[in-house]
Amino acid sequence: MSAKRDRCRICLKWFVPSAHEGKRQQVCGRRACQKERHRRDCAAWRKRNPDYDREDRLRRRIRAEETPETETRKTVTPLAGFRWDKVRDAVGLEVAVVVEETGAAVAAFSQSMQTERNGPRTGGKEAHVSPR
Ligand SMILES: [Zn+2]
């Protein structure tokens, strides 16, 4: 019986690939190697999707710390109909995100101003504006 053996890409030791993974398995089953493989996969993924993290970090950076994320996201923004992927293509990621967040902030502000104006008289409505 001659089991097919492969060399682990990480520790470079020979191993017998598990039957169902067959040719696709390039890393042995040792925990350290599996962990390293996962790390490399993630790094490769980030390299293929460089904007993913960048956008997230930028959003967090330009958003006020205490802004409750879900409240802002739920706000109906006047820019909601924009094709942000197209905007991004045109002006670049940074500008698109800044404009988008500005739109959300303006919408939230005008909404809170409206509620403030109507709030005390209509009663009960002010509760959802400032959850703090
Ligand atoms: Zn290994």
Image (spheres, helix red, strand yellow):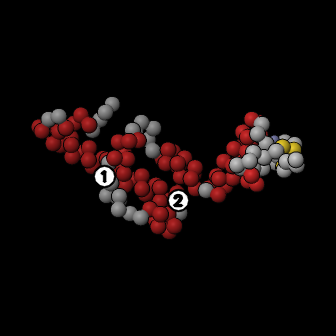
Q: Which residue is drawn at 21% across and 43% down?
A: 115
Q: In this view, does 49 lie above or below 67?
A: below
Ligand 1 visible in quadrant: top right
Q: In this view, does 102 lie above or below 129?
A: below
Image position of 108 (left or right of 24)? left
The residue that label 2 is drawn on is 93
Q: Residue at x 27, y 49 (%)?
A: 110
Disc on res. 76: 1
Is label 1 in a helix, a strand or a loop?
loop
Measured as percent of width and height from the top left, residue 93 is found at 53, 59
Measured as percent of width and height from the top left, residue 91 is found at 50, 66
Image position of 107 (left or right of 50)? left
How far apart marks 2 and 1 lie (CA) works out to 22 Å
Labels 2 & 1 near each other (Cβ < 8 A): no
The front one of 91 and 68 is 68
In the image, which is nearer the foreground, mark 2 or mark 1?
A: 1
The front one of 23 and 99 is 23
Query: Residue at the top extreme?
Result: 132
Q: Is residue 111 above or below residue 97?
A: above
Examine the rendering and report whether any part of residue 76 can be seen.
yes
Is label 2 in a helix, a strand or a loop?
helix
Measured as percent of width and height from the top left, residue 116 is found at 21, 41
Precedes in sequence: disc 2 or disc 1: 1
Q: In which quarter of the image is the C terminus?
A: top left
Query: Residue at the front extreme?
Result: 1
Using a 10 Å C-alpha cutoff, classify the residue at mark 2 as few (fewer than 14 neighbours), some (14 to 19) or many (20 or more).
Answer: some
Q: Which residue is drawn at 74% across and 35% down?
A: 31
What residue type is disc 2 on?
A: Leu
